[in-house]
Amino acid sequence: MNKELEHSFVELLEKHQNIVHKVCRLYTDNYDAHNDLFQEITIQLWKAYPKFRGDSKFSTWMYRVGLNTAITLYRKSKRRVNTQDFDGVEFRIKAEDYDDTEEQQLKTLYKAVHELNDIEKALVFLYLEDKDYREISETMGISEVNARVKMNRIKNKLKTILNP
Amino acid sequence: MDELELLKKDWKKQDAGYKQLTSNEIYPILQKKSSSIVKTLFYISIAELVFWTLINCIPFFTSGSYRERLDEIYSDTLVITGLTIISYGVILLFIYLLFKSYKAICVIDNAKKLMESILKTRKIIKYYVIYNLVMAFISMVIAMYLAILHNSELSHAIEKLNNKQLFIFFGIIILFTGVFVLLIWLFYRLIYGLLLKRLNRNYKELKKLEV
């Protein structure tokens, strides 16, 4: 692949890399795993980049490739070793932003989201990224009605976890 | 407040928390090799094609006596030519189907379609394995039968057996061959089971949403 293509890809990825980080954050629970998945998503994005025609936004396209890699293609690498957990490190909720109750509630919520299955996580992720149900259904390959129904079930599930 | 709305509010604040990679750090990643299940599946299918082709060819090319025996046993050249054409035809057909299904796997498809493409590829490999195992079973049983028929000592020994003993004798041969084939099949199930466990689980979950 030519240098120009590589350069434009790297430039776009650098700008939108948070999308990949956020997918990694939902599907992994430590730094090594995060980096490993980030690497695999980047490789998949790069492999598919020549097919990217620019008729959709690069970020929209990234959501699809990122989630597909996390849900379907990613095979946990053996080189990974369990190290530090995310909880309480990079993504800790800053005390000054929230009161105690809200902070605690958020911690429980993040923990609850991590316990969801891969498909539920994907729906939550797209929801958190402000995607409408049409886009969620197109990304997942399910009907819009089913996406809504599932999302409501997830909300109830989270509610139950938070208020047992 | 809705739990997810609370989470969304916080989710957006976290953007600044991720370690930002510079372009100099991204370039080396592009040179790395993918370790996706599609790649693994691809290597396994190639290994299977090579393995079964070698199993069929190696004894024929390496052992002169084996070749002579085969020539003797399968003296009907029309049958043997027909069988060879069919078996190579089947291999070529599987290579074509595999190639086609790999080309159909596209990471920019929606999640469900991507999973279906991978599962379809896996199915083609499965059929290839089943075909080989069935052929292995049939040819082992036939080969044993022909070996006995062409070996005068064994033939005489078998002639002395009564019907019940003969039945038990062939029963044991078929049973052992069956167990051997079954063990290979279980081995395959284990490999694919482990590799595609997560994909199967997620696909079922997506399908469940349609009910």
Image (cartoon, rainbow, N blue to C red):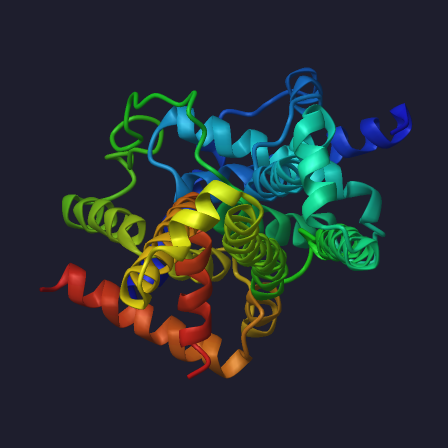
A99 left or right of B195 in image: left
Viewer-proximal residue among B23 and B88? B88
Residue A128, given in percent of the width and then of the height, sits at 45, 57
Instruction: Work out whether B64 lies above or below A152.
Output: above
Residue at 31 percent across and 31 percent down: it is: A86
Q: Quadrant of the C terminus of chain A?
A: bottom left
**Residue A19 occupies which quadrant of the picture?**
top right
Viewer-proximal residue among B149 and B144? B149
B37 left or right of B5 in image: right
B10 left or right of A63 in image: left
**Residue A120 occupies which quadrant of the picture?**
bottom left
Viewer-proximal residue among B161 and B26? B161
Residue B183, given in percent of the width and then of the height, sits at 37, 47
Instruction: Work out whether B60 lies above or below B87.
Output: above
Whether residue A13 is visible to the viewer of this picture, yes or no, is no
Residue at 40 percent across and 23 percent down: it is: A80
Whether residue A38 is visible to the viewer of this picture, yes or no, is yes
**Residue A1 occupies which quadrant of the picture?**
top right
Residue B120, given in percent of the width and then of the height, sits at 61, 62
Residue at 30 percent across and 48 percent down: it is: A114
Residue at 31 percent across and 74 percent down: it is: A153
Q: How many marks?
A: 0
Viewer-proximal residue among A29 and B45? B45
